[in-house]
C-alpha cells in the first residue's frame, strides 16, 4: 500500500488536506521514506497539510527523525470489559 499512501501524501502536501496512515508498524521501511518525503528540498508544503500516523509500539525500529518531528499522542487500552464498553459508547454518543 506504499504507492497509494505516497500519492495521498503528495496530494495532501499540495492541497492542504489531512492524511491518515494506519498500522504503520507493519511497514517500518516505508516510514523511513516518509521521513524523507516530509523534508522536501524542491517542494513547498501547504500550511494546512496534516499527517496522522497510527502505530503500535514497535521498539527502536521506528525512524527516530520521524518521531522527533511529530507530536505524539498515546492512548492506553481500558482495563476490563465494562471500561471498554463505556469508552466505546462515550466516544461515539454525545
Image (cartoon, helix red, strand yellow):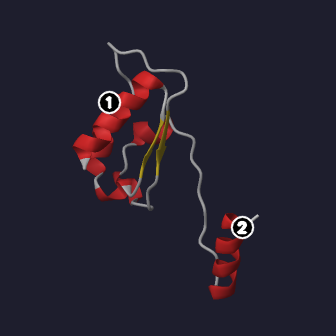
The picture places residue 17, in percent across and down from the top left corner, at 48, 32
User: Looking at the image, which is closer to me, 66 or 21?
Assistant: 21
**As displayed, is residue 42 above or below residue 13?**
above
- Quarter holding the C terminus? bottom right
User: Looking at the image, which is closer to me, 88 or 59?
Assistant: 88
The picture places residue 74, in percent across and down from the top left corner, at 59, 57
The picture places residue 73, in percent across and down from the top left corner, at 59, 51
Q: Is residue 7 left or right of residue 68?
A: left
Question: To which residue does mark 2 refer?
Answer: 93
Q: Secondary structure at mark 1?
A: helix
What residue lies at 63% left-to-right and 87% top-to-bottom?
A: 81
Q: Secondary structure at mark 2?
A: loop
The picture quadrant where one finds residue 35 is top left
The picture quadrant where one finds residue 10 is top left
Dot 1 surroundings within 10 Å: few (below 14), some, or many (20 or more)?
A: few
Dot 2 surroundings within 10 Å: few (below 14), some, or many (20 or more)?
A: few
Residue found at the very far front of the displayed protein: 93
Q: Is residue 58 left or right of residue 49?
A: left
- Report, in whole angstroms, how far the alpha carbon at label 2 lies from the one at label 1: 39 Å
Question: To which residue does mark 1 refer?
Answer: 36
What residue lies at 38% left-to-right and 24% top-to-bottom?
A: 39
Q: Upstream in the sequence, badge 2 or badge 1?
A: 1
Amino acid at each position: 500500500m506504499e504507492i497509494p499512501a505516497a500519492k495521498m501524501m503528495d496530494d495532501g502536501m499540495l492541497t492542504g488536506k489531512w492524511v491518515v496512515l494506519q498500522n504503520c508498524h507493519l511497514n517500518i521501511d516505508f516510514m523511513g521514506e516518509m521521513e524523507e518525503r516530509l523534508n522536501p528540498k524542491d517542494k513547498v508544503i501547504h500550511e494546512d497539510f496534516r499527517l496522522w500516523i497510527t502505530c503500535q509500539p514497535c521498539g527502536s525500529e521506528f525512524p527516530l527523525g520521524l518521531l522527533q518531528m511529530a507530536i505524539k499522542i498515546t492512548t492506553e487500552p481500558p482495563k476490563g470489559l465494562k471500561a471498554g464498553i463505556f469508552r466505546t459508547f462515550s466516544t461515539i454518543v454525545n
